[in-house]
Image (cartoon, rainbow, N blue to C red):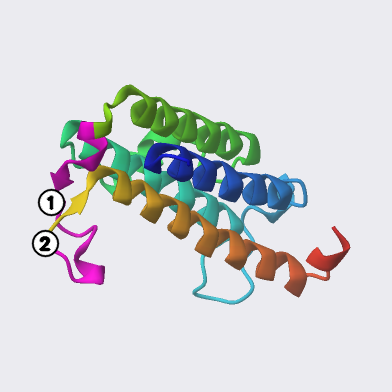
């Protein structure tokens, strides 16, 4: 039987494999593109994926609040495709290292992080559950990116 840690890591790896497939269909010229005015650009979607993960990681691991502005400052060249790819990889590496560094007891410890768990109506969650949320969040935005590509004629059923 798999452990909760193994299941969360598998989920994070699975959704990242999906994102990696999408990344193979993106290129630098698509970074500033969005399907319609007011929608996130392709680069914005990638920043949302990695930035939200990093914000949560810093909050869970260090009780440090990282703003969206901090994320943009850390990334630097916001719409540079290779910079964003490296940032995605670096943040995921840090997340997996953090999860791997914790004891089973620490993973199950109830944590309250305002703004991150109220949507499911609970006052706190086991620490590991926040990383299930990271995978779900990434999957949501990967789906959006697939739709972006499909809108441009890149049919994902042909990948």
Image quarter of the C terminus: bottom right
Q: Distance between the residues labelled 1 and 2?
A: 7 Å
Q: What residue is drawn where x is 22% and y is 61%? A: 117
Compared to 136, does 61 lie above or below? above
Q: Nearer the viewer, residue 150 or 126?
A: 126
| Residue 121, image x, y percentages | 19, 71
Span colored in magenta: 105-122
From the viewer's side, name the closer residue of 5 and 25. Answer: 5
Position in image of residue 62 (x %, y %): 19, 31
> Can residue 140 be spotted in the picture?
yes
> Which x, y percent locates residue 64?
18, 36
Whether residue 22 is situated above or below residue 96 in the rendered picture: below
Residue drawn at x 45%, y 36% as measured from the top left:
75
Which label belongs to residue 112? 1
Label drawn at residue 123: 2
Q: Are the two marked residues, 1 and 2, in contact with CB atoms closer than 8 angstroms? A: yes
At a point 52% along the width and 38% down the height, the residue shown is 88
């Amino acid at each position: 039987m798999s452990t909760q840690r193994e299941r969360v890591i598998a989920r994070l790896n699975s959704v990242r494999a999906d994102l990696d497939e999408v990344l193979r269909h993106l290129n630098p010229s698509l970074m500033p593109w969005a399907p319609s005015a007011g929608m996130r650009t392709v680069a914005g979607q990638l920043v949302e994926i990695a930035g939200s993960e990093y914000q949560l990681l810093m909050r869970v691991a260090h009780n440090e609040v990282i703003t969206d502005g901090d994320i943009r400052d850390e990334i630097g060249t916001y719409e540079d495709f290779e910079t964003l790819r490296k940032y995605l990889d670096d943040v995921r590496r840090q997340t997996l290292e953090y999860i791997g560094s914790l004891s089973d007891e620490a993973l199950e410890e109830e944590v309250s992080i305002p703004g991150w768990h109220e949507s499911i109506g609970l006052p706190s969650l086991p620490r590991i559950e926040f990383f299930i949320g990271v995978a779900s969040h990434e999957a949501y935005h990967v789906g959006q990116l697939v739709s972006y590509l499909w809108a441009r004629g890149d049919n994902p059923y042909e990948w």
